[in-house]
Amino acid sequence: MSSSAGQRIDEESYTSWRQRSELEKMTDLPQALDDELARLDNQFWIPRTKLEEIVSRFCEELEEGLAKDKQNIPMNITWVHNLPTGKERGTIMTLDLGGTNLRVCKVDLYGDEGRKQGDGKYGMEQEQYKLPEELKKGESDALWNFIAEKVEAFFKDHKLDQQYSTQKPMPLGFTFSYPATQDRIDHAVLQTWTKGFDIKGVEGQDAAKQLREKLQERKLPVDLICVINDTVGAMIASAYNDPETIIGGIFGTGCNAAFMASLSSIAKLDPNDERITDASSHNGAVKGEEKMAINCEYGAFDNSHRVLPRTKYDEKIDAESPRPGEQTFEKLSAGLYLGEIFRLILVELLDRGLVFNQDSNQDTRKLREPYIIDTGFLSQIEDDESHKFTKTRELFQSTLSLQPSDVEIEISRRLAEMIAVRGARLCACGVAAICTKEAIKKGHVAADGSVANKHPKFKRRWTKALGEVLGWKEEECGEGEGPITITSAEDGSGLGCAIIGAMELERRTKKEAH
Ligand code: BGC
């Protein structure tokens, strides 16, 4: 038996989707569709032995990124030297440029004091603005102007203009969730756009400088003190409350993770570099035990196509994306792409006359629109327990103007499961690789993102795959949980960014006092 996706065949791959599926059958499929499912399952199912192979290569790529610049996985240096103590205090404004929205927040950190007084450790005021689609493929000026305009509006609406001035500016942190090279914490040269963005004039440039210029043009009383990645934000926000935090992970539109690496393991960093000796001497770390948060940017894993089982649908998505050849791992596992994989399979079945055939007289034009189906669509199908799947029917109607038959509902449920299971199992590989490399045996992965938070079965599937690949024993695991568990990152991109801002201000104060 051979596999078109190049999967290693072992005993497990002989178990059919029928044995593995958690879905109850709603109706029988005609033989032709049944055969199709078996073919697709052979390409999408990733057995344990393949997971192990992926994790082993993943570990090598993580090492390569720490050893040298310009590797597949960049392992970006972040200049965040510590996890927080939990005592950090202050008021910081944060900006979060995600894949879909811009969020502006004012974060008040109360540290332990707040907790003692029963106020909680932080307070937050926030506004969210949808990023116009044309901005994502436009010019850099339009992007920074949009952001500066929203900061200005936020200042007015929240009466911050009465408290801050250009002489006494408000500290500002920027969560910029794209791969960036940082020479300092307030600097970020964009390596490449991801998540379908294609804005001209930012790649190779310092995004912090471009934003700062636009803020200054408007004479806004803010001081941009740090640029962070959402994974680092998730890890730091979680660690503010939870000392068992080991990793910050985003399983959303994109996918990526961050962890604290010991300085000695980052071969590409010169330990005598002034910026390191200087930072270490002001953050209280014991000599020899200094750390640095690493933003892995592991969405770029396997860009050289050595190990991931790519299907023709994955190849098509890649070829038609703004950056073909990049973010190979992300394109198989992250939220932006799961719905599109589902759509491409349905279109293929349609073209072969296996679904929505001409007799049913349906208008299939919407189904032909790229990216019309998002991950939420798949989550809702998998979540649908309504009688006769009325919710799924409504979803097809509202998103695609289609009225699916029972057979079409049944095949859609199977496809949604197959694609999401592969995504979750792959997502486990990134975390398994970090844990293997760092010899981490237990702890919390602070996770954020639409797939982690909104997909009903993601956590369970992710945990199961992690257990398979890390070889957990039954006695180590609780109900649906292992020694390494996913916890929800409390608002990483806002809170985490503010905490990093407060840590940076503290470091600067100590340095000045020195
Ligand atoms: C970006 C990362 C980010 C991840 C999750 C990826 O596309 O390159 O910087 O952490 O998405 O948002």
Image: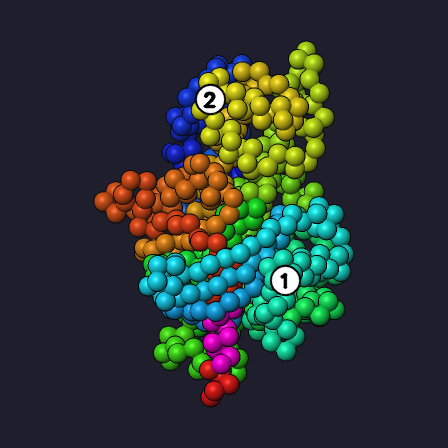
Residue 103 drawn above or below residue 269: above
Kind of residue at badge 1: Phe
Kind of residue at badge 2: Ser
The earlier-in-sequence mark between 2 and 1 is 1
Q: How many marks?
A: 2
**Residue 110 seen by the camera:** yes
Residue 290 drawn above or below residue 36: below
Position of residue 356 in the picture relative to residue 448 (left or right): right
Q: What stretch is highlighted in magenta?
A: 501-509
Q: Position of residue 482 (x, y in %)?
A: 31, 46
Position of residue 9 in the picture relative to residue 468 (left or right): right
In which quadrant of the rendered view does residue 183 lie?
Answer: bottom right
**Nearer the viewer's eye, disc 2 or disc 1?**
1
Residue 377 among magenta residues = no
The residue positioned 36% from the left and 67% from the top of the image is 113
Residue neighbourhood size for the residue with mark 1, other residues' Cα within 10 Å, grouped as few (<14), some (14–19), many (≥20): many
Q: Position of residue 202 (x, y in %)?
A: 71, 61
Q: Where is residue 275 in the image (x, y as percent from the top left)?
A: 53, 80
Taken as a whole, is the magenta stretch helix, strand or loop? helix
Residue 507 among magenta residues = yes
Residue identified by numbered label 1 = 155
The residue positioned 54% from the left and 61% from the top of the image is 106
The residue positioned 40% from the left and 28% from the top of the image is 22
How far separated are the C-alphas under marks 2 and 1? 46 Å
Residue identified by numbered label 2 = 386
